[in-house]
Image: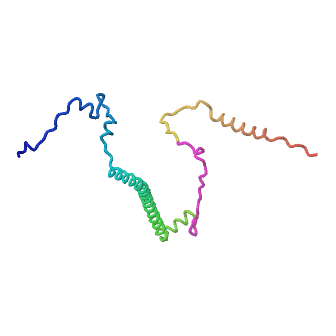
Amino acid sequence: MTREGAVRTAPAPSSASRTSGGRRGSGRVDVRAWAGGIRFSAFTAIMLGLVVLAVFTLVPTVGTYLGQRQQIAALAHSVQVSEADVATLQQQKDRWNDPAYVTSQARERLYYVRPGEVVYLVDNDLPATAMPPTQAAVSAQVQETRTDWMAQLVRSVAGAGLAQTAAVPPAAPAG
């Protein structure tokens, strides 16, 4: 037997077998012809049942596994944050063992001073709106004022003096 004799060629399908073999002229699949070609046996039913059972068994365990992996990742991150906090606290503890740091903290926080030192405490309690705005740049040109500043000063002082006396009611006579 030669190789040519061993090769078999399938007969070309006719146009009648193409349209009735599962496809119709519109390109849709004929479901009845397709479903009729499927053969169910007891083995197929058992295997299909095992696949469904495996899916129902594995889906909850996979969900549990993924949830536990997320918890492990969250706990690992929490451990890293805690380790960073411990390292920061250890550095702070080491700083408090330094006498110079203790002295500086006592001066800064508790306002301790050495004997003979004078402390000036500046209280900056002005709100941000009451702070003066930044000063504008000084002009290189000389400008002339339109009003007489001396007359304006006298008017301001006289107005303040008269307003003060007008605001005080006259004393009632006793008796």
Q: Please say whether residue 117 is one of the residues in the magenta stretch.
A: yes
Q: Residue furthest right?
A: 175
Q: Residue furthest left?
A: 2
Give the left or right position of residue 107, taking residue 81 as reference: right
Q: Relative to 54, does residue 96 appear above or below in the rendering?
A: below
Q: Relative to 101, does residue 125 appear above or below in the rendering?
A: above
Name the residue: 58% across, 68% down. 116
Foreground residue, 110 or 56? 56
Name the residue: 8% across, 43% down. 5
Give the left or right position of residue 36, taking residue 168 as reference: left
- What stretch of residues is rendered in magenta? 110-134
Residue 121 locus on image (x, y percent): 59, 58
Report the magenta stretch's main SS: loop
Q: Please say whether residue 90 is one of the residues in the magenta stretch.
A: no
Give the left or right position of residue 161, taking residue 143 as reference: right
Residue 27 locus on image (x, y percent): 30, 30
